Amino acid sequence: MIPIKTFFKVFALTFFIIACESEESTPTPNPRILNLQTTGDSANELLSAKTHQSLVLELVSVKGFEPSKEAVENLKDFIEKRTFKPNGIKLVQRSIESTNKEKLTIQQIDSIEQKNRTQLSTPSEHAVFIYFSDATAKPSDDETDMHEGHMDNNIVLGSAYRNTSIVVYENTLRNLTSPIQNEKRRKDILTQIETFTLQHEFCHLLGLVNLGTRLQSQHEDVDENGIPNRHCNVKGCLMQANALFESDLMGSIRVLELDPLCIKDLQANGGR
Ligand SMILES: [Zn+2]
Ligand SMILES: [Zn+2]
């Protein structure tokens, strides 16, 4: 995959060449251009109602790996609580065939998106694409890539990539809960992990932490080398890097919420 910066250089150059060829011909812009930005770039538009009054969530799952209804409702409630979308949030859901690959890189997931995404952003409405995968995460060859993988104890649960794209590794989530014997309890815990993953990744699209939404106070966490890691250092916050495993996974997992510092950042960037 072409790194995003190179892509724009190539795009700009192509545009220039076409523009020079003939004064008459207007180049057709890539219809996907509004969905090819970097994670966090659309934070303000997703949070506020200044330009974008509604939102479409397109949920595409591999057959048999659909999220629970409650988890999807929880995501919708969460977005309503934190953003201004006076014309509402629309859900578009469907299932597709598996790629039959055990592991997928973010580049491969991106090409699944390019093939299957039907809802594109416009200047007045954003569309967010969420893919529920039956494959596990494979590290990218290209480290300059455009995504934020969410890792808990080295298990990648989901990833936000580009400005309006998320992947949830549904198979990984199910494997985590498979040791739970009681069927009802297993389903409940799975719903909670799905909810956590969806809300956490969506918050990266909303620019948390320090990823397009400016910090109002210093609460960005650092990795083991002291490098800021786009997560929150407040214990118990939804945006903590190891939030899920900080809670007692096999006991009763707490419903994780944003702490007041993350909420302040969102509010300062047009959210609620
Ligand atoms: Zn994360
Ligand atoms: Zn936080």
Image: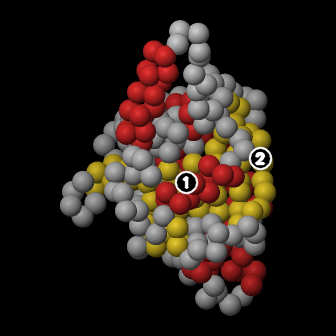
Q: Is residue 187 above or below residue 225?
A: below
Q: In the rendered image, which quarter contains the C terminus?
A: top right
Q: Which sits earlier in the primary sequence, circle 2 or circle 1? A: 2
Relative to 55, 82 lies left or right: left
Q: Amino acid at mark 2?
A: Leu
203 or 95, which is in the foreground? Answer: 95
Residue 159 in percent (x, y) is at 51, 58
Residue 164 in percent (x, y) is at 57, 43
Residue 89 seen from this side: yes
Residue placed farthest to the left in the image? 225
* Res 210 → quadrant: top left
Residue 81 in percent (x, y) is at 65, 41
Name the residue that disc number 1 marks. Answer: 110
53 or 64, which is in the foreground? Answer: 64
Give the residue drawn at x 59%, y 62%.
168
State whether label 1 is within 8 Å of ligand 1. no
Residue 187 in percent (x, y) is at 72, 76
Binning the other alpha carbons within 10 Å of mark 2 as few (below 14), some (14 to 19) or many (20 upward) gives some
Distance (Cα) linking label 2 and label 1? 21 Å
Relative to 123, 66 lies left or right: right
- Disc number for residue 91: 2
1 or 149, which is in the foreground? Answer: 1
Give the residue drawn at x 37%, y 62%.
141
Residue 253 seen from this side: no
